[in-house]
């Protein structure tokens, strides 16, 4: 199981990304608009830099919903490989059958 502090940090980042998503998108749109004057684009880039770093979507890291494990993460199920195997063996994931040959 991952440290609770790391799991909580990721949850906080997710909240911040949602909170600032519209503001970041608007500023990026101004920055990338070549028809705007250079001064306005520069001011928008400064405002973007003033936003909290954790509000950027690139700082998010996928973690297992049950254990918080950051590695071997299956996006479709939002689980790590270990939990996928355990739940699959218990028959709790529909359509998943443990193979044997």
Image (cartoon, rainbow, N blue to C red):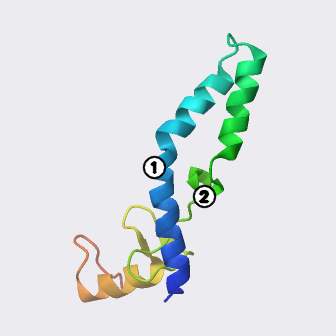
- Please report the residue visible at 44 percent of the width from the left and 62 percent of the height from the top: 75
Q: Is residue 57 above or below residue 7?
A: above
- Please report the residue visible at 68 percent of the width from the left and 45 percent of the height from the top: 50
Answer whether labels 2 and 1 touch (C-beta < 8 Å).
no
The foreground one among 8 and 84 is: 8
Q: Secondary structure at mark 2?
A: helix
Q: Position of residue 33 (x, y in %)?
A: 65, 18
Q: Position of residue 25 (x, y in %)?
A: 54, 34
Please give left or right for residue 87 compared with residue 37 in the image.
left
Give whichever of discs 2 and 1 has the lower sequence position. Answer: 1
Residue placed furthest toward the top: 35
- Please report the residue visible at 51 percent of the width from the left and 80 percent of the height from the top: 69
The residue identified by callout 1 is: 19
Work out whether residue 61 can be spotted. yes
Q: Position of residue 19 (x, y in %)?
A: 45, 49
- Please report the residue visible at 29 percent of the width from the left and 74 percent of the height from the top: 96
The quarter of the displayed image where residue 86 is located: bottom left
The residue identified by callout 2 is: 54
């Amino acid at each position: 199981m991952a440290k609770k502090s790391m799991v909580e940090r990721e949850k906080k980042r997710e909240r911040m990304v949602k909170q600032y998503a519209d503001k970041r998108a608007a500023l990026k749109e101004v920055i990338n608009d070549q028809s705007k004057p250079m001064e306005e684009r520069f001011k928008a880039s400064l405002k973007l830099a003033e936003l909290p770093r954790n509000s950027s979507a690139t700082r998010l890291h996928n973690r297992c919903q049950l254990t918080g494990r950051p590695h071997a993460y299956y996006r479709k199920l939002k689980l790590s490989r270990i939990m996928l195997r355990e739940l699959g063996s218990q028959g709790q994931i529909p359509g998943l059958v443990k193979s044997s040959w």
